[in-house]
Image (tube, rainbow, N blue to C red):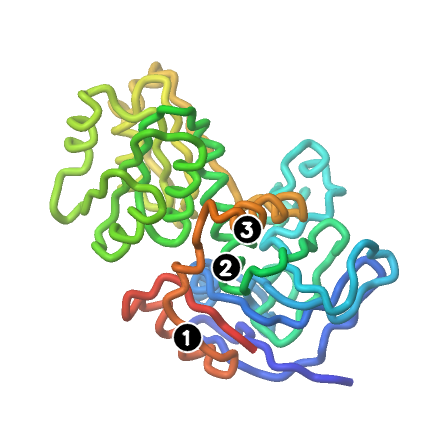
Amino acid sequence: MFRMKAAVYVEPGRIELTEKPMPAIGPNDALLRITTTTICGTDVHIMKGEYPVKPGLTIGHEPVGIIEELGSNVHGYREGQRVIAGAICPGFTSHACQDGHPAQDGGCHGHGYKPMGGWRFGNTIDGVQAEYALVPDAQANLAPIPDGLTDEQVLMCPDIMSTGFVGAESANIRIGDTVAIFAQGPIGLCATAGARLRGASCIIVVDGIDQRLSISRNMGADITLNFHEVDVISEILRLTGGRGVDAAIEALGTQSTFESALRVLKPGGTLSSLGVYSSDLTIPLNAFCSGLGDHRIVTSLCPGGKERMRRLLDVVSAGRIDTASLVTHRYALDDIVEAYELFAHQRDGVLKVAITP
């Protein structure tokens, strides 16, 4: 049996590069030879034991690769074709998917609904930080990469770009809106680009790292605020003449950023939440206007499926966004443990790391 290198979860605090058997595909699957992947913040939560997965599981969920083998039921693709697959790879058979929510393709598990069920790579099945990876329900999830695009140009599409864009889409941004975006990590930066594409006329972004604020201007930000230097809530209210913003996007997952997003929102505005929260949230009574403010609070998980990926690839191909600039560091798969150490500690100005087997 052929074997391959893969990064696996061992125990809290420990990711290890090991060898394991290459995946055996079924009739609805595809085998990808991974050419580039990356590390996500969720992978760091897994490494730390904050999100439980089975020991020995290959992690990672952002694949760019070449089709090595196709299952007998998968048509319209060819071996040797360059493709991506979304981090969320739905089967489109669950009640949630059929009801128009493909990210929630998990159904009911045990004691209740599992909202991360559509996320399979590196969660419920082996992921893509490996030389090869199995793509389930490949007919629904493979998206060909347009000619002329590099791996790094499309590397953000499977997760970061899809998530950031859905934050802007869920915020119901209209042409001429003023939008505030809290946190300018990779997802927040893509939310900034998404707000620009949706037609916002004034995009205010908040972060504590000047380098990220500088990058955000290239992604579409009009005003950048460093929360170490200014009272962000007072400044946003001043900038909007006391009116508040039409939409606020929270892209970090903390009580303080969520609450700040709510406090700068106009009556009738939308708070679009992208953060993954690790503890209970509290909604302040006055910021919530005692429930009388006509506010909308919307959460979103990364949309997947081949049509979503096609649309994102077309946006990149058309030159509407440059996410390759978010790749700040590059490592071979052999050095992925070192890459995790860099990324987990956010050293050396890291935004995203490209991993190449």
Name which of mark 3 and mark 2 comes first in the sequence: 2
Quarter containing the C terminus: bottom right
Q: Nearer the viewer, residue 212 or 40?
A: 212
Judging by the rendered image, the residue that carries numbered circle 3 is 317
The residue under the point 37% across, 18% down is 268
Q: Nearer the viewer, residue 356 or 23?
A: 356
Mark 3 residue element = helix
In the rendering, at what x and y percent does residue 135 appear? 70, 61
Disc 1/disc 3 C-alpha distance (Å):
29 Å
Quarter containing the N terminus: bottom right
Q: Which quadrant of the view contains residue 132?
A: bottom right
Q: Is residue 201 left or right of residue 72?
A: left
Report if residue 112 is visible in the image. Answer: no
Mark 2 residue element = helix
Q: Is 43 placed above or below 267 here?
A: below
Judging by the rendered image, the residue that carries numbered circle 2 is 153
Name which of mark 1 and mark 2 comes first in the sequence: 2
Q: Is 69 placed above or below 169 here?
A: below
Name which of mark 1 and mark 3 comes first in the sequence: 3
